């Protein structure tokens, strides 16, 4: 197994069969070695720096009905909210004072936030904080909409592909949603010039090792700037309520493999990982992750953006979140830095 890991670290590639063996491997020594190699490469590219992204969950209205998601439109037990433009701008102001230089606006697919409204929000954030990066994570839109938002100043876009296998995608989503459209969105975003993040849940219902290998092949060919992965966690108001959650071990394993596959990729240690294990995010950082996304949403809405059960950090205020996160990062052996934290392109020698 050590050979396989060395080859992945050196050549950033393996055969499908080797990927499967590595993903399934449960020898503690081999897994420790994988973690060590991932951390080595992470430190070569990014040192001990950890980038902060201030996450603003600005609407939990959603027109979609993804089977796994707690805020799917069919869930009538959600108390819906949307933040006003003023709320969003003041979240950014407060985040700026706390040291954030990237704001991630994430939400359900809420038709209220049409292009005009979103463009005006993006413009104003950029006007107030020209040294900050804006990341959008508002799902599938059409190319001209992505273009308008980019022209208004959005720098990055997060759209997880969820799974690179069409049949698996169709299992996880209702018939109105299309795998091909999601893939087209990712392609459009990249062509327009966004720094793009994709990613998948680990342990989602119906996921097999072969699906994970397909995900890795997709990452290899798509070359995203960022990969957001986290364990699937059931939500009590969905049909998957009795399914088991993804595991910490599998999430850490995939973080390390992705770090070795795409050495310069931005890799967050996600809230979902911190939810299934109190030290999940710290372990994620030690396994190759280099980004954390503390919550900047106002305290009164945090308990309403629940994609899955037992989500952490729903009670804290932003200042508390950043203090807690900075301490956790330091304890794990790394340091939070105050910068936009752009992607470092090792091959082209550019930073975006
Ligand atoms: N609506 C936007 C972004 C919000 S959802 C979009 O569709 O892109 C952000 C991510 O949360 C999703 O991409 C999904 O991977 C993850 N997520 C949703 N439900 C989840 C669950 N039950 N467990 C773990 N992650 C979940």
Image (tube, grey):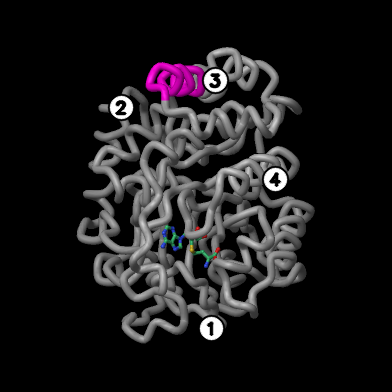
Q: Nearer the viewer, residue 299 or 178?
A: 178
- Within-10-Å neighbours for mark 3: few <14, some 14–19, many 20+: some
Q: Are marks 4 and 3 in contact (CB under 8 Å)?
A: no
Magenta extent: 27-39
- State the quadrant of the C terminus: top right
Residue behind label 2 places its C-beta within 8 angstroms of ligand 1: no
Q: Which residue is mark 2?
A: 332
Q: Is residue 277 magenta?
A: no
Asked whether residue 130 is in view, the answer is no
Q: What residue do we see at 26% from left, 27% from top?
A: 331
Q: Is residue 28 magenta?
A: yes
Q: Position of residue 256 (x, y in %)?
A: 50, 30
Q: SS of the residue at dot 4?
A: helix
Q: Which residue is mark 3?
A: 41
Residue behind label 4 places its C-beta within 8 angstroms of ligand 1: no
Q: Is residue 330 above or below residue 136?
A: above
Q: SS of the residue at dot 3?
A: helix
Cα–Cα span, label 3 and label 1:
43 Å
Cα–Cα span, label 4 and label 3:
21 Å
Label 4 or label 3, whichever lies nearer to me, is 4
Q: Which residue is mark 4?
A: 218
Cα–Cα span, label 3 and label 2:
17 Å
Q: Nearer the viewer, residue 4 or 90?
A: 4
Q: Is residue 246 above or below residue 67?
A: above
Which tag, 3 or 2, sits closer to the chain's start? 3
Cα–Cα span, label 1 and label 4:
32 Å
Which tag, 1 or 2, sits closer to the chain's start? 1
- Within-10-Å neighbours for mark 1: few <14, some 14–19, many 20+: few
Q: Which residue is mark 1?
A: 112
Which tag, 1 or 4, sits closer to the chain's start? 1
Label 1 or label 4, whichever lies nearer to me, is 4
Q: Position of residue 205 (x, y in %)?
A: 48, 60
């Amino acid at each position: 197994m050590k050979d396989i890991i060395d080859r992945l670290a050196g050549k950033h590639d393996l055969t499908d069969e080797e990927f499967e063996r590595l993903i399934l491997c449960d020898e503690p020594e081999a897994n420790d070695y994988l973690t060590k190699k991932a951390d080595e490469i992470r430190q070569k590219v990014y040192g001990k720096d950890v980038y902060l992204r201030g996450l603003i969950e600005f609407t939990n209205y959603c027109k979609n009905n993804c089977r796994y998601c707690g805020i799917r439109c069919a869930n009538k037990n959600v108390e819906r909210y949307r933040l006003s433009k003023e709320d969003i701008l003041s979240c950014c102001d407060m985040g700026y004072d706390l040291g954030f230089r990237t704001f991630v606006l994430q939400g359900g697919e809420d038709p209220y936030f049409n292009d005009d409204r979103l463009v005006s929000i993006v413009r104003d954030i950029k006007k107030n904080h020209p040294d900050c990066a804006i990341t959008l994570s508002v799902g599938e839109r059409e190319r001209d909409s992505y273009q308008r938002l980019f022209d208004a100043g959005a720098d990055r876009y997060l759209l997880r592909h969820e799974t690179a296998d069409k049949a698996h995608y169709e299992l996880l989503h209702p018939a109105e949603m299309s795998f091909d459209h999601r893939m087209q969105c990712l392609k459009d975003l990249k062509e327009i010039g966004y720094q793009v993040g994709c990613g998948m849940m680990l342990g989602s219902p119906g996921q097999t090792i072969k699906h994970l290998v397909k995900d890795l092949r997709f990452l290899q060919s798509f070359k995203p700037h960022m990969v957001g992965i986290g364990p699937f966690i059931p939500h009590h108001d969905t049909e998957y309520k009795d399914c088991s959650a993804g595991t910490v071990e599998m999430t850490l394993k995939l973080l390390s493999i992705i770090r070795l596959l795409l050495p310069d990729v931005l890799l967050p240690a996600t809230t979902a990982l911190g939810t299934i294990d109190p030290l999940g995010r710290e372990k994620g950082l030690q396994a190759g992750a280099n980004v954390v996304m503390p919550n900047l949403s106002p305290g009164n809405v945090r308990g309403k953006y629940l994609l899955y059960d037992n989500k952490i950090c729903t009670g804290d205020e932003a200042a508390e979140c950043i203090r807690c996160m900075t301490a956790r990062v330091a304890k794990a052996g790394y340091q939070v830095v105050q910068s936009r934290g752009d992607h470092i392109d090792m091959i082209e020698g550019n930073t975006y």
